[in-house]
Image: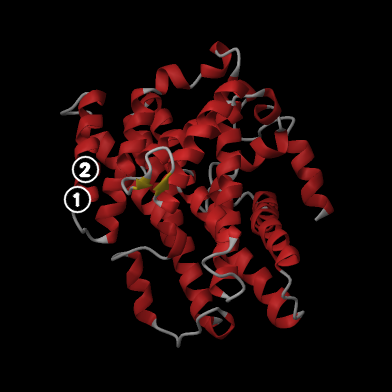
Amino acid sequence: MDELLSQISKEVQVTKKLPVSARIPWLDAARGICMILVVFGHAIGGLSGAGLLTQQSTLVAIDYYIYTFHMPAFFVISGMLAPLSISKNAKQFLINNIKFILYPYVLYGTIQILIMNLFSNYLNKPTPFNPFEFLGLIIGSPSQFWFLKTLFCVHIAYLLSRKYLTDNGFLLLCIALRGGVELLTLPSEIAAFFTFSIFYALGVIFSKEALNWPAHSRFPLIWAFIFGLFWIFFTATLYSQDVPILGGRVSGSLLPASITGCLFVFALSGTKIFGNFRPLTYIGRNALVIFCLHVLAVAGARIILMKILWISEISIILPVITFVGIAGPLLFLQIVERFHLRAALGLGPN
């Protein structure tokens, strides 16, 4: 672990894969924030599944707030970077998506299904080994890997749309799709595509202005405060469905909460405090490996603490498994990089 922390300290000086000038620090910081929240949210979910949390728990409410924006933010960021990548080399864009999105989806999805089946007796809901679960890679998606599958499909949809639609036309199409998912009951994979493509399209539309926005913003922290207030209001409104200002109960789409939550995180990431916090940007640069492996790390740490060490105190378990969910995959990455296997394992270029 000391070696991992030392490596993080070294990594914050330079990025091995790209020159510093090619990085966009606030995007790395935003990825880092959202990746930490993904791990934290899944850690809460694991504790809830283990029966340590009730639906009335404050942590369950926090989990709800997190889920309003952290995955939409990843789609917005992907959309911001897509036009430039396609303009440089559309063929390479497609190849990279196959190598670093589709391939990790299949590889780590398969590994996770296999491990979860082999050690199912230790899980919150033990089930007998079921080889048909591997079909979930084709029909459905295992656990967190729905994101990679959906992102790949959205990337391909955008790549194909550029032959027939402008970026504005693509956004209008995604708005229509989002309207469909609000009104219709759709299969989960189609619903995910319809739900999140709008965030990707928004990233595409604002990519030119947004990529360097911190350089043109004098008070990003004030914007973070403003967007944060709107995000809390919209999220609280739908969580409780009780709006004192309106004097009644309401319900509706999470879209306003998702958009303002994304803007809140982006504004935070544009501040010197977060944008220059190098361990955070390091996590953001390596978000893929954390995303692919964190569920196994979190579940493994929780099982050891609860079923081997007999620890049931949430205040101990939650921070430990969250830390392991982040540090474990990064430690694995250091081993992989020593043997120059990063690209071979679908975790980014060597």
Numbered circle sitting on residue 183: 1
Residue at the outermost right position:
2
- Can residue 99 be seen at all in this image of the molecule? no
Name the secondary structure under disc 2.
helix
Name the secondary structure under disc 1.
helix
Residues at marks 1 and 2 touching, judged by CB atoms closer than 8 Å: yes
Classify mark 1: residues with Cα within 10 Å, few (<14), some (14-19) or many (20+).
few
Distance Cα–Cα, label 1 vs label 2: 6 Å
Residue drawn at x 74%, y 30% is 13
**Residue at mark 2:** 179
User: In the image shown, does 232 or 185 lie closer to the viewer?
Assistant: 232
Residue 132 position within the rendered picture, expressed as x and y whole percent measured from the top left: 34, 79
Residue at the outermost left position:
164
User: In the image shown, does 229 or 108 lie closer to the viewer?
Assistant: 229
The quadrant the C terminus occupies is: top right
Residue 212 position within the rendered picture, expressed as x and y whole percent measured from the top left: 52, 18
| Coloring scheme used | secondary structure
285, above or below 313, in the image? above
- Can residue 314 be seen at all in this image of the molecule? yes
14, above or below 294, in the image? above
Residue 223 position within the rendered picture, expressed as x and y whole percent measured from the top left: 55, 23
Numbered circle sitting on residue 129: none
Query: Given the image, on which type of amino acid does mark 2 rest?
Result: Gly
Residue drawn at x 84%, y 52% is 2
Residue 50 vs residue 164: left or right?
right
Query: Given the image, on which type of amino acid does mark 1 rest?
Result: Leu
